[in-house]
Image: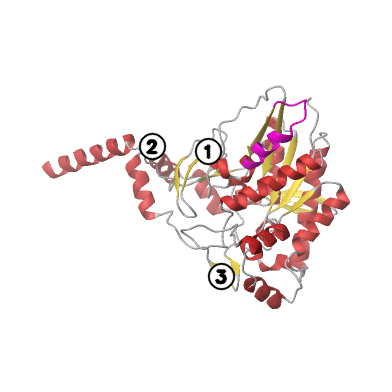
Amino acid sequence: MLALLGLAIGLVTAEVLLQVAPYDVLSYPLYQTDETFGAVLRPNLAGWQTKEGRVFVRTNAQGFRDRPWTAAKAAGTFRIAVLGDSYAEAVQVEREEAFWAVLERELTDCLPAAYRRVEVLNFGVSGYGTGQELLMLRHKVWDFDPDLVLLAFLPDNDVRNNSRALEPRDERPFFQLQEDRLLLDNSFRQDPQWQALERSRWVRGKDWLIRHVELAAVVYQLRHPLAASPAAVTDGLIEQGLSRQIYRPPQDAAWREAWELTDRLLLTMHQEVTARDIPFLVMVVTSGVVVRPETEPRAALREELEVEDLFYADRRIAQLGEAAGFPVVVLSAAMQAKAAEEGVYFHGFANTQWGTGHWNRQGHAFAGRRLAEVICGEDLWKLPR
């Protein structure tokens, strides 16, 4: 009895100290199941991310990695909605360093007289493909009355993410092309594993405990550490989660279908945005191997794939945008040139491996400034409604 009493007192004391300590953990599940998107970020999340870099991360009440939002838009505000995956979610850098925050600041210098301020809202969620981003546009973005929609497109895994045949993680909605029409496939809802996560009392109870009891969160962190780890290279020069197939024209039926589906998803997003008299802009995100300062990794990959350069995806998306009438910001060539000239890495962190993984602050800064140049230079402003 004395031993149990001592243990109870110790646990209560530890919990009180953790509750008042200025340190939060981000190791409890970052995502939760969702019937529309498969998974979403948890709202009102706060804690440290240390897997790539070291950043204190917060999500807002809507469940996005950004500051608090209001659906109502102040008069004279130009509001941009950003769609994307982990590059837009950007938990590897401080919020103020993310490309969409840089874009917001840079645009202030070229505001038309009709506007007084710029707001950039980040709807990015890690792991999303273009199909989920189209659903995000339909189910979330329009509630916030944007004046421009920006899609951050990462060909290195977005094309694969869109294909049920190629994507290994199928607990997500997919679109299929049937008779030249996009049809939504929500069969992931019938997956036993997804249903177990959605309905399990044990999972819900454990989740509640981790989110409300600091000791439980610490135990979860010890069992599932967000420790620093270098980006894994699993296929020659290609990082884990990325695909070598996007650096050349599709070689088989599955990849041809994946690209055709991706093209149609982008065109559909463009049509739905411009139907509301709103500009649509696509930014093609880079991968580490393409924009490293060293030339040897690129040369080895080009030789292995028997291609002259690694810009097939860039060209394809740019040509699609030119034909359809939406601007495309391609970063790879300019980033590659700057990296070689200045010896700077746009991907990687001190606690991982330089030139791999997500954009660091230099990568985000480059992208944010380039986006601002395009929006200002091509006059993509929309008159206030």
Q: Local crowd at mark 1 within 10 Å, few (<14), some, or many (≥20)?
A: many
Q: Which corner quadrant holds the C terminus? A: top right
Give the spatial CA distance, label 3 vs label 1.
31 Å
Q: Secondary structure at mark 3?
A: strand
Tags 3 and 1 touching, CB below 8 Å: no
For the point 69% across and 36% down, which residue is it?
141
**Image quarter of residue 170:** bottom right
Give the spatial CA distance, label 2 vs label 3.
38 Å
Give the spatial CA distance, label 1 vs label 2.
16 Å
For the point 43% across and 48% down, which residue is it?
27
In the picture, the disc for residue 119 is none
In the picture, the disc for residue 59 is 1
For the point 80% across and 55% down, which residue is it?
318
In the picture, the disc for residue 212 is 2
Looking at the image, residue 98 sits to the left or right of residue 8; the answer is right
- Name the mark nearer the viewer: 2 or 3: 3
Q: Which residue carries the number 3 mark?
A: 234
Viewer can see residue 157:
yes
Provide residue 137's location: percent of width, then percent of height. Answer: 71, 40
Inspect the magenta stretch and tell me whether residue 344 lies in it.
Answer: no
Question: In this picture, which residue range is highlighted in magenta?
Answer: 102-116
Q: 127 and 70: which one is in front?
A: 70
Provide residue 354's location: percent of width, then percent of height. Answer: 54, 62
